[in-house]
Image: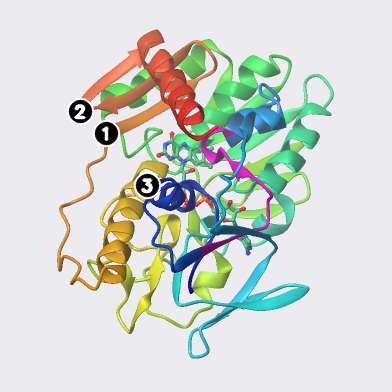
Amino acid sequence: MKNLVILGGGYGGMKILSELLPNDLPEDVRITLVDRVPYHCLKTEYYALAAGTVSDKELRVSFPEHPQLEIKYGEVIGIEKDNKKVLLKDSEPISYDDLVIGLGCEDKYHGVPGADQYTYSIQSIEKSRKTYSVLNNLGPGSVVGIVGAGLSGVELASELSESRGDLKIKLFDRGKHILPAFPDRLSKYVENWFHKNNVEIINNSNITKVEENLLYNHDKPIPCDVIVWTAGIQANKVVRELGEEMDRSGRLIITPRHHLPNDEHVFILGDCASLPHAPSAQLAEGQAEQIVEVLKKRWNGEEPPVQFPTIKLKGVLGSLGKKHGFGMMADRAITGRVARLLKSGVLWLYKYHNG
Ligand SMILES: Cc1cc2nc3c(=O)[nH]c(=O)nc-3n(C[C@H](O)[C@H](O)[C@H](O)COP(=O)(O)OP(=O)(O)OC[C@H]3O[C@@H](n4cnc5c(N)ncnc54)[C@H](O)[C@@H]3O)c2cc1C
């Protein structure tokens, strides 16, 4: 039996499983899925978990069951490419014939002193739970500083303002306008929503240091009861420490067939891979489909395609609390209730197909 080992049951890892199971896995191949969480987590909703508007259980999707699939619960601590082994904390190494690394990403602190120590995070389920706990135990009138107004910072700030109207929320962003990756019209719409909903936006900010309950903007201290960091991501530490060529965010350089340039048996997936688009769940899924095509061709003794078509992304949708949203669909900006309904619909469909 050949062993395909998948590290990480996130959006990319789950898509590989759903493409191969139940009927497309050759009889002589088994799959070992390794994750430190015993179910698939809906990371795109961590902002709502942290804000206290959805329960933990709503963000869990069971891993599939299949006679050729083994689920291994554990923490990946390293990979020995030369021996084709994955190292786990407190457990025996796992041997692979083919390896897919889809371990997601972590916060990137851009060298800001104290940021890793004194800020909370929504980049993993464990960290989002801690963030939920501190945010929801705050007394009335407490100040929450959110650093970074990209998609996840905006979603957290808006959800929290609806969940805890008694808090003072300050959203710090480097740019002249928030949501720099979106057209101006959308940024302005979202800024107006924040003005109406008492979220203070601090544009052109430069966080120079973080101390306990103190955020330094351009070296000026601003007292905050809780600080949440949403100002950048980088590939998982295990990936960054592999010693392979990577981009500025620690994502590994890959070939058009999605494997390492020096090892055709090690595929890099989703937020761990350096790709021409910004990392997203959609991108991880699109890439997973192409990896499956490479694997299936090889298992069949055929040559995989040398080049794949560019992965098509359907668009981006963001929420502003439970009733409003914004996004880009087919290059068109959409705002308001329709955008929010579409976002809920996408989530419902995802749960329906995977749950
Ligand atoms: C608040 C927020 C909102 C977002 N909204 C959107 C959106 O609307 N649309 C969109 O497309 N994208 C969105 N994203 C981005 C999206 O969530 C990621 O791009 C996507 O999850 C990447 O998928 P992945 O398979 O690469 O990794 P992940 O889905 O992060 O999965 C990684 C898996 O690896 C496991 N893991 C990690 N380290 C280890 C280890 N050492 N040992 C064992 N297991 C480990 C984790 O438990 C996890 O199951 C959002 C992200 C956030 C934080």
Asked if the residue at tag 3 contacts the one at tag 2, i.e. Cβ–Cβ closer than 8 Å, the answer is no
Query: Counting residues from the N terminus, which is met first, the one under dot 2 or under dot 1?
Result: 1
Q: Is residue 36 above or below residue 14?
A: below
Residue 275 visible within the image: no
> Which element is circle 3 on?
helix
Q: In the image, 36: left or right of 306?
A: right
| Label 2 to label 1: alpha-carbon separation | 6 Å
Query: Counting residues from the N terminus, which is met first, the one under dot 3 or under dot 1?
Result: 3
Which quadrant, please, contains the C terminus? top right
**Residue type at the position of mark 2:** Ala
Q: Disc number at residue 330?
A: 2
Q: Which residue position is annotated with label 3?
A: 285
| Label 2 to label 3: alpha-carbon separation | 18 Å
The mark total stands at 3
Q: Disc number at residue 210?
A: none
Queried whether the magenta region covers residue 38, the answer comes back as yes
**Of the pair 148 and 205, the residue shown nearer to us:** 148
**Residue type at the position of mark 3:** Glu
Q: Residue 213, located in which quarter of the rendered image?
A: top right
Magenta segment, which residues? 31-45
